[in-house]
Amino acid sequence: MKIAFYTLGCKVNQYETENLKGRFAAEGFELVEDTDQADVYVINSCTVTASGDKKTRQVLHRFRRQNPDAVLALTGCMPQAFPEKAEHLPEAQIITGSYHRARLVEYVRRALATGERIVDITPHRAGEGFESMKTTRFTEKTRAFVKIEDGCDRYCSYCIIPKARGPVRSKPLDALREELEEIAQNGYQEVVLVGINLSSYGKECGLRLIDAVELACSIEGIVRVRLGSLEPELLSDDDIERMSRQEKFCPQFHLSLQSGCDETLARMRRHYDTAFYEALVDKLRNHFPNCAITTDIMVGFAGETEAEFEASLSFARKIGFAQMHVFSYSVREGTRAAAFPGQLDRRTKELRSRRMMQAAQENREIFLKAQVGAVADVLFECTVTEEGTEGHTKNYVPVFVKADLPLSRKIFSVRITGVQGDHCTGELV
């Protein structure tokens, strides 16, 4: 049986898809690309924004047209958050949320054998444990994503993720050590620790994120440890100090901002203000010179005035982010913000998004140009293009190098010589 996967959303979703691939392969399924004719298609969905739900529906339509007789399995955050809507998607023969992901192989076999439709979505509950899951091989080949945390209890006014992902729960350190050691044995030199609310790691069991970082840095064979997205207010001074002592730690911090205006942050129910955020960035830059500060920033939130948007734009320029993911607010049914007054029209959101993305591009150019002349260790990817082989520095600057010797999956010292578009160029030292 041939099976294809399609993943939407975050690195946690990507990790979970890789785990599912391993489970199906172990049961004798042949993994193929999603553009191929397959007997089974698995869609791992994202529901952070309304556009994520739209993409899920579009992918279901495409796969059904592509192969009318295939079994289509929908899993992930969309059905978990909106079970009634998911159940009424006619193309999906199997519908599960994130809670019963481990049963997906069983459900696919049943659907193939009987043709029945299976819908199994169980709400998350307080006190549930971390899903036992180990993934040690990845199609990306160069770096390994390791999910160490799931769930969120921050309840921002615009966000449906607490419903989709449930309470905070964390991977035990002994299980994490076992997974990391096997990842290292499989030749991955860099690991990225990821979670739904990564900064909350260990909250329910007396641990902190720094405990997982120090463990990862202690694993022989792993030479780089990187973090996924972080909630700013949960990163303590002690965490920063201890991270700065780890030679393997990569100085790239994705600090979710959402808005650079205090009034907007308050309506969003974020747990910090711009003064706190700026002070945190200063601490990080003091401990990690030339670190990359990246972020997510939302425009057009309910009630956002022109003055509030200008304040957010000005703050983004002031911080000087190395990279910004800019997106427009979309109403999520079931959140507090869905009932807020002052919902903005699409045109206003688009105009503000363009202006914020222009600022993001300008910040990006400044950051990349500041790297020119530096010598950095670069971990190279597997893909070779006309521009050379792409790799990334520890602070995640993309660098293309042309060389006669094979570079893929190796680390070389590189002198950064210039900037081309969204990446740097370099030469081997």
Image (spheres, helix red, strand yellow):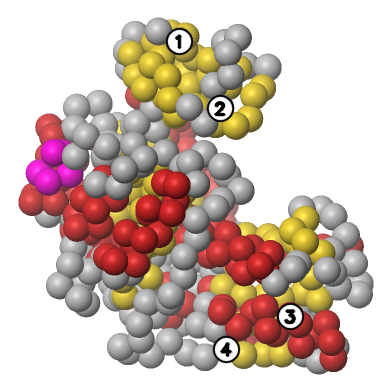
Q: Secondary structure at mark 3?
A: helix
- Image position, residue 179 (x, y; %): 40, 59
Say left or right for 46 vs 71: left
The amino acid sitting under disc 1 is Leu
The amino acid sitting under disc 3 is Val
Q: Tag on residue 121?
A: 4
Q: Secondary structure at mark 1?
A: strand
User: Residue at position x 74%, y 80% from top?
Assistant: 108
Question: Between disc 2 and disc 3, whose residue precedes?
Answer: 3
Q: Are marks 2 and 4 in contact (CB under 8 Å)?
A: no
Spatial distance from mark 3 to mark 1, Cα to Cα? 49 Å
Q: Nearer the viewer, residue 222 or 46?
A: 222
Q: Secondary structure at mark 2?
A: loop
- The answer to whether residue 74 is above or below residue 367 is below
Q: Nearer the viewer, residue 398 or 337?
A: 398
Spatial distance from mark 1 to mark 2, Cα to Cα? 13 Å
Q: Which residues are magenta?
A: 241-245
* Residue designated by label 3: 108
* Residue designated by label 2: 408
Confirm whether the magenta stretch covers residue 322: no
- Image position, residue 286 (x, y; %): 12, 32
Say left or right for 236 vs 174: left
* Residue designated by label 1: 428
Q: Secondary structure at mark 4?
A: loop
- The answer to whether residue 411 is above or below residue 104 is above
Question: Between disc 3 and disc 1, whose residue precedes?
Answer: 3
The amino acid sitting under disc 4 is Ile
Spatial distance from mark 3 to mark 4, Cα to Cα? 15 Å
Q: Are marks 2 and 3 in contact (CB under 8 Å)?
A: no
